């Protein structure tokens, strides 16, 4: 890792230019703050080039090691297929680069252990694994609530994980290793406990499941804290993508994922919380507003509510204040709308 | 506006370093992509310096015109008090700089008209007014739904706008000009119609309203399309900050703001939509995940799910696949947790 | 009114054998306890006979006065058209019979005053008016909550009243006198205040409203307690029958009618209550169960869960208790299902 | 069973005068139609007398056989403790009386089989078992929806059964035999399948469970149709009584019991149905209204909305119709409220 000015953006090499990798390139370039994509790596050179071309000052590579050696690469995002992860991680460790590694860390426990050992040899953590549910606002609120202890100790966790349809290559084992892997992590994270045993129950498959696919499945995890976590995994449910979790605790339950924000059952009441101010309710709106303005301004344009909208609101409010003071109905008179705002 | 490299970040002067201005500085510096704060302006020099000091390469000013003349200023965000907006806007027009102007555009219709005229003299739009509800995901979904015409023409809009408590300086007129101003814009935007008349009804004030404050109020807007829009404004409701809107159309209604996402009534059904894939459900989680990784990496650290978490998930999934294949309960064996991950 | 044994069922004359009257006959005969229909009255003799024939021991009349004179008539239910109400009420007062009078009491205020005077001359109340919303479980919970004063004084009431489609004879005035009449009573009852002024706003009619019908309308009531009550009345909304009310009080709001039970906003929380025991949650189920059994037994039959269902549950529970005690999976063995239960 | 006039009320002997028996006596006497309690039986003669005394014309017994022999007894409701059920059922079969038998039918499968055999010897069904959830409006809607086949074949059923606290005598086995017994029947009824195996999982007990009580438990039923039905039973949850069920089918899911009516997930939409007319929405209100009137009239009184309420509504509607016709605000003038209505 070359010297980097303290406030300069982080230069990121994205390894893997498939759907997930390309989406991360877009995210770093257009959405988040403080980083830029300086390298895109893919075994398919054309694919690497196509994605790299979308970003100013970004180079395409086919070799991850070469990319990591570049002077403008400060960090690595691994979005290649699982079997390629171990080599990429070890290469990043060679250069002590921070890595965001899409899940799975590696495809099996033995290779994962080798990664653990290599990271320990570094003497400090360098890997963040892509269990992104920990960053979902609803999961984060559920975890925060459990951590307060208000509901008492968690006894059970009921999880639902439903996809509209599975891709053609999906196998019965992948319902566990690809899908339920998320609930394995969510269970460990929400409960703060390790999983000690697994049972998988097999209801009669849905007629909508491809031939020979065991779908749905019902998985039960037991933990070293004595909790149970059950998972309905149903990857051909047909109606939508739905991820739900309900924590059942000693003094109440808390549920996320069904079209509400976090809903709790406590002491005779079900329901959720109400924001206490506008920063909580409209924080995202402010972020999007300013981003929209910046995006337009960088290309020389102007978007969003116009000065005409500002004028019209002012005229309406003036009339409203008169109506408040004098009672009755007050008409609003606007000048003719100028051509610029039509 | 100086020449700017096509992909360089936009240099922004933030005018006003109060609560709102400082929050926009943080937003541009830490949250959004493609811009950096190069100038902070406030009549209070100390306040300007304190806020500017939080951002690398940012200069403090007391004079907006001086800030706008700086080589590294490409755009202006106006977050000063309303009476200062007109001068700032006209100065920005002098330099043809794009402006994001917090609402109100100006405090009254006459001054707003002067701004309109000045912008027309430029020949192109340069002002985006800070009606941020248009960027709220719920409002945006409501507007998009209305625009499809699926529900038919909108006939009425019912709005609720509730604050926990009003600040000490709040007057009865400010319930209109400061609070209902948002609904004035939302009504115009959602319906695509201008407001032609206003009536303000005054129920007996709440015992929790400060002396002499007319709170709540009930405002009825009429539009040039024949629609009605009623607004409950209640700034001392005590229980929370709540903004709701229900559009009543010819073939159904759609409501936002009560702890659900958008809820519609149509053809014998109430309810909402279910995401169709993970990009829709977990897009925000991915954004936050990568931002958390970048923020940690820029300071030399690592955060979030560790390689241990990746290993544990791999071990659990291996056991799960065995349980699926062989039936029954399969125990999960983990190596002892290394010190690095404790 | 003849002498009636103290615990004998109440003999009821139902006046009016149209849709509403016939439904009340069915209700008294089949659903509620302690009464029987002994007379059905209609100006159309055939219609009276047809309805009376459904009930054992019930006589058809064309003259209300003759019916009220019958020895087996203890009470009168008036379900005839509104213009016929005054005469029926005065006739019932003559015999001091208790009356349940469908709304409206009479079609106008002047005739209603005459009824009031006649009842006062009796010296005691004899009329219950059919404002049945007061008996709706949701409205009753809302009223009970307001009466506790927990939410403080009610300041505003927002009402929605929507019908799929209006009947052909419906006029713009009937939206007020036939539909909003319910909200007029609900406002008075929920707030415990009299209405002192009415305003009716007319949005552009829906394309689905019949020619010349002003639909929807938006009505604002003011009360002698300083509260406002607004009513959206929309009788051709197309999607369903929906009646909603939200009371906005000094310390919270409470809403009924949108697919939940009562939902409140209070002190940072939205939501509803959870039943505390099975009598609250399943009271209606017990009532229906026993009614189903009685209805079948009176006709010599047996319905509902059979002895086979009882046996199967016993066998499952035995296996369950074994599974609890011994761990693992326990199979359930049933005898072959006998022919009687197939 | 003596000759009974075809339309005379059914004479019911209630066996068992404890909490459940007494509640059924009240229900038959005051709530439902077509039956009267003619006998109350309890081994405790005083208890039988006390309950019988509440009903006119009702006799107390200590011997069920004697009660069944009475001329005014047409049917038997068994609400005694489970071990007494078999004898009562066989005695009722002797007289060919219809029986509503509270669950459990009998305490174990062997005795239940003997009851089955005795009923078959009669040649027709005489027993309705008290699985009252089949009569709950929400369960009934769920069952009806499943029966339509709209959602496809049911694959899984997720059940939650929570009580605030268990009574002192409750044992771990009773969580199965007393509580989960309801879900055993609900599973069989909703799915139309027999249960073939049971597994009971034991999470670490809640700190709020009495010593040595295994609470909560997690029960998994397998059925002969290949479906799974899991049950969370938690009898010391502390916060309320909550019974929920979600059926997961091939093309959607349907859930009851969480403060909404039936909520489905289908084809990109979650939500519920909207009533199509007032008979559906307000049927219960009409039933309660007429019952309240009858109850008051039988005791010589009058209750509910008064003629004054009818007059006030008429006056408000008159003003409303004027306001509609003429525009603007119309005041409502009422006469002074007469003493009779204060």
Image (spheres, coloured by chain):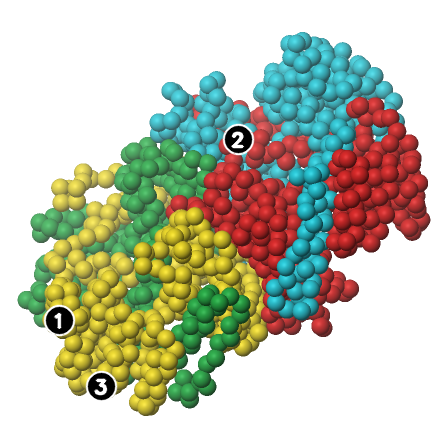
Chain colours: A green, B yellow, C red, D cyan
Which comes sooner in the sequence, label 1 or label 3? Answer: 1
Q: Position of residue B233 (x, y in %)?
A: 44, 59
Q: Chain of mark 3?
A: B
Residue B101 lies, in percent from the top left, at 30, 74
- Residue C173 drawn above or below residue A245: below
Which disc number belongs to residue B60? 1
User: What kind of element bears circle 2?
Assistant: loop
Helix, strand, or loop for circle 1?
A: strand
Q: Residues within 10 Å of mark 2 (few under 14, many from 20)?
A: some
Q: Is residue B273 above or below residue A187?
A: below
Residue beneath disc 3:
B95
> Crowding near pointer 1: few (<14 within 10 Å), some, many (20+)?
many
- Label 3 packing within 10 angstroms: few (<14), some (14-19), many (20+): some
The nearer-to-camera label among 3 and 2 is 3
Give the position of the N terminus of chain B as an image quadrant: bottom left
Query: Residue D5: which quarter of the image?
Result: top right
Task: Tell me the distance, in whole angstroms, between the alpha carbons under discs 2 and 1.
Answer: 65 Å
The chain holding disc 1 is B
Q: Quadrant of the C terminus of chain B?
A: top left
Circle nearer the viewer, 2 or 1: 1
Residue placed most toward the observer, B139 or A85: B139
- The span from disc 1 to disc 3 (Cα, nearest Å) is 19 Å
Q: Secondary structure at mark 3?
A: loop
Q: Chain of mark 2?
A: C
């Amino acid at each position: 890792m070359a010297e980097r000015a303290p406030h300069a953006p982080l230069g990121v090499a994205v390894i893997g230019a498939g759907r997930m990798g390309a989406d991360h390139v877009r995210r770093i370039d257009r959405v988040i703050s403080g980083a830029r994509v300086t390298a895109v790596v893919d075994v398919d050179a054309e694919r690497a080039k196509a994605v790299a071309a979308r970003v100013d000052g970004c180079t395409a590579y086919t070799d991850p090691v070469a990319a990591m050696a570049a002077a403008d690469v400060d960090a690595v995002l691994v979005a290649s297929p699982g079997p390629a992860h171990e080599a990429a991680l070890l290469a990043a460790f060679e250069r002590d680069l921070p890595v965001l590694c899409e899940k799975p860390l590696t495809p099996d426990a033995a290779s994962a252990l080798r990664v653990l050992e290599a990271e320990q040899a570094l003497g400090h953590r360098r890997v963040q694994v892509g269990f992104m549910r920990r960053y979902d606002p609803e999961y984060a609120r559920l975890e925060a609530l459990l951590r307060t202890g208000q509901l008492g100790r968690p006894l059970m966790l009921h999880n639902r994980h439903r996809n509209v349809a599975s891709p053609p290559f999906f196998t019965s084992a992948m319902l566990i290793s690809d899908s339920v892997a998320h609930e394995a992590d969510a269970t460990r994270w929400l409960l703060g406990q390790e999983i000690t045993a697994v049972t998988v129950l097999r209801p009669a498959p849905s007629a909508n499941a491809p031939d020979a696919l065991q779908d749905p499945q019902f998985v039960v995890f037991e933990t070293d804290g004595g909790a149970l976590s059950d998972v309905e995994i149903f990857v051909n449910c047909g109606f939508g993508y739905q991820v739900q979790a309900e924590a059942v605790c000693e003094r109440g339950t808390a549920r996320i994922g069904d079209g509400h924000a976090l809903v709790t059952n406590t002491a005779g009441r079900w329901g959720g919380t109400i924001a206490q101010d506008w920063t909580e309710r409209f924080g995202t709106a402010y972020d999007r507003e300013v981003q929209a303005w910046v995006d337009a301004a960088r290309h020389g344009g102007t978007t969003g509510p116009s000065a005409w909208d500002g004028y019209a609101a002012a005229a309406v409010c003036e009339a409203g204040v008169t109506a408040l003071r004098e009672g009755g109905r007050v008409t609003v008179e606007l000048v003719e709308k100028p051509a610029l705002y039509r």
